[in-house]
Amino acid sequence: MTDALVDDSAPAVCSRSARHVLAALSLLLAVSAPLAHVDGPAAQAGVDSRSRLLTEGRMPAFRLQDPAGRWLTQSDFLGRWAIVFLGYTSCPDACPTTMTMLTQAFGELGGDADRVRALFVAIDPRRDRPEVLAAYLANFSPRITAGTGSMAQVETAARAFGMRFEIQGDPNSRTYTVDHSVTMLLFAPDGRFVSLVPGGTTAAELTAVLRKRFQTAVGGR
């Protein structure tokens, strides 16, 4: 895997506006990435080029709740590298694969894993009640936090990050599925957006990307 479509670890030779142009190109390329497809016609989308992530180049404002009922905002993810992605506990393939990959990557990082935090934006609040999310998270690294809320709150957060999801089937049933973006987003400790992490990335690949970031970050953070 190539580290970043936007590589701010390189020498600073371009202006902030130029870096935003590079970010725009990266996100426009990502639009061609498919949503995770589960029993339905997945739309073609990855990260929306119109999102605040593109226009500001930073982690957008959001407000969600963790399974214990604590409010989570963008401020809670400053000071560490942050990985943000969408998912839901009934997802049969992409989500458990991503959660397992992240858990393995944190294990490979050893003590450096304390420098990273992941946010699982839970996009199925109808079924993913706090107790369901807590039980699901218990199977994976404690460095992965889930954020949820009302459907409106979840939709607002996903839109702010430029990611998409779409319910397939009757939302009043217990058998519907959710197509969603599988691209993950990597943010620096100061909140800067620095890289897309494509779906299918392995733990070894992500570990290599993060170690490179640690080595080149200002002050070693």
Image (cartoon, helix red, strand yellow):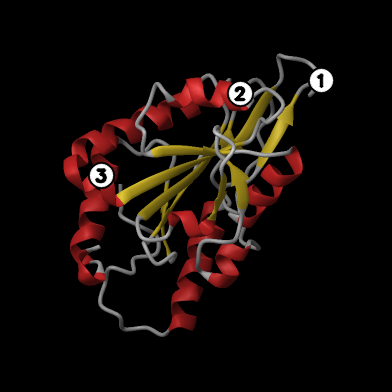
Mark earlier in primary sequence (3, 1): 3
Q: Is residue 139 above or below residue 79?
A: above
Mark earlier in primary sequence (3, 2): 2
Q: Position of 54 compared to 118: left or right? A: right
Number of other residues with Cα within 10 Å of mark 1, as a class: few under 14, some 14 to 19, many 20 or more: few
Residue 50 x/y as whole percent? 66, 63
Residue 22 x/y as whole percent? 46, 71
Q: Position of 133 compared to 199: left or right? A: right
- Residue assigned mark 3: 113
Q: Is residue 176 above or below residue 10?
A: above
Looking at the picture, tell me which residue is in the foreground, 18 or 162.
162
Q: Is there any visible trace of residue 77 in the rendered image?
A: yes
* Separation (CA) of disc 3 from disc 2: 31 Å
- Residue assigned mark 1: 172
Looking at the rendered structure, the kind of residue marked 1 is Asn
What residue is rendered at 58% in x and 29% in y?
88
Looking at the rendered structure, the kind of residue marked 2 is Val
